[in-house]
Image (cartoon, rainbow, N blue to C red):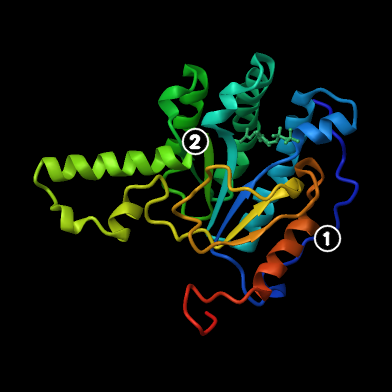
Amino acid sequence: MWTFSKLRRRSALKRDDFTRLPRHVAIIMDGNGRWAKKHRLSISTGHRQGTETLREIIRHTSDLGIEALSIYAFSTENWNRSREEVAALMQLILDFFASEIDELDARNVRILILGDKAGLPDKQREVLVQAEDRTCGNTGLKLNIALNYGGRAELARAARELALLVQSGEITPAMIDERAMADHLYTHGQPDVDLLIRTSGEMRLSNFMLYQCAYAEFLFPTVLWPDFTVADYDEALRAYGGRERRFGGRTPR
Ligand code: FPP
C-alpha cells in the first residue's frame, strides 16, 4: 500500500539522552482527517498514514525502554462516523496486526487491548485475542491499544466487578479503595500515565484513561498525527523531563 515517506524524520535520541523518561505514555492520535483533507486524499488514506506514524512511534518507545504505551485507536463514539470510515478503520486493524505482529513479538512487546472486544466484529476480535495470547509472556514494552474503548465505561466496568465481589462476600465495601479500583481497570498492574500527548492542537481528553491520567502531564503539539515524527516525539519526551511533578505536594518528584 502506498504511503508518504517520512521526509521530516531525523535521527532518534537514545535513552541516555534523557534525564528522565516517563514510565507510561498515552497518545491520542488526532488529526488524520485534517491531514487527509489538506492533501486532498481520502479519510482512509489519512488513517493509513496515521498507522505509519504509529509504527515508528511504537518502535522508538520500545527502543527507549519505556514501560508502557497506550494509544487511542477507536473510541466507543467512533461508531458514529460514516460506514465507510468505520469499515476503513476496521480493515486497518486487520492490516496492522498482519504486518506488525511478528516484529512486535520479536521486540518482546506485550499487546493488551483496552476496551470492549465483544462489541467488535468477529474477525477483528479473533485477531486481537490472538495477538494478546501470542504476546502474553513478553516482558518488554506493554502496548495498550484502546479499541471500542471509553474511559467512563471502563470505570463503570470496574465498579460492576467490585460490586460483584461485595455481593459474593469476597470483599467488604470498606475494601474498595483507589488501589482496588486500579486493580479492576484494563491496565491493572501498570503504572499510571505519566505523559499524555494529543496531536493536532486539540486540548481535550475525550474520555481516554480518565482514572490513569489523574496526575499525567499533558502535551498538545499542533502537528497532525500523520506528520508527527520521532523527532517530535523526542521533543515531547524532553519537555516531559523538564516538567516539575508535585502530585499535589510542594516538593518536586
Ligand atoms: C483521530 O483522527 C484518529 C482516529 C479516530 C483513529 C486513529 C487510528 C489510527 C491512527 C490507526 C489505527 C490503529 C490501529 C492499531 C490499527 P481524526 O480522524 O479524528 O482526525 P480529525 O480530527 O482531523 O478529523
Image: 6 above or below 88: below
Write the residue at 58% across / 50% down. Answer: 107
Rendered-image quarter of ligand 1: top right
Classify 10 Å Cα crowding around label 1: few (below 14), some (14-19), many (20 and above): few
Write the residue at 49% across / 36% down. Answer: 149
Nearer the camera: disc 2 or disc 1: 2
Image quadrant for the N terminus? top right
Instruction: Indicate the position of residue 214 as horizontal and vertical percent values.
Output: 48, 59
- Image-quadrant location for residue 90: top right
Instruction: Indicate the position of residue 152 as horizontal and vertical percent values.
Output: 43, 41
Residue type at mark 1 is: Ser
Q: Which of the two residues, 201 or 21, is positioned nearer the viewer here?
A: 201
* Numbered disc total: 2
Mark 2 highlights which residue?
149
Image: 154 above or below 247: above
Residue 42 marker:
none
Q: Which of the two residues, 61 or 30, is positioned nearer the viewer here?
A: 30
Pick whichever of labels 2 and 1 is earlier in the sequence: 1
Which residue is most to the left?
Answer: 169
Under circle 2, the secondary element is strand
Instruction: Indicate the position of residue 30 as horizontal and vertical percent values.
Output: 70, 41
Mark 1 highlights which residue?
11
Write the residue at 17% across / 44% down. Answer: 165
Disc 2/disc 1 C-alpha distance (Å) = 34 Å
Cβ atoms at labels 2 and 1 below 8 Å apart: no
Whether the residue under disc 1 has CB within 8 Å of ligand 1:
no
Looking at the image, residue 106 sits to the left or right of residue 125; the answer is: right
Image: 14 above or below 171: below
Classify 10 Å Cα crowding around label 2: few (below 14), some (14-19), many (20 and above): many
Write the residue at 69% across / 43% down. Answer: 54
Which residue is most to the bottom?
Answer: 251
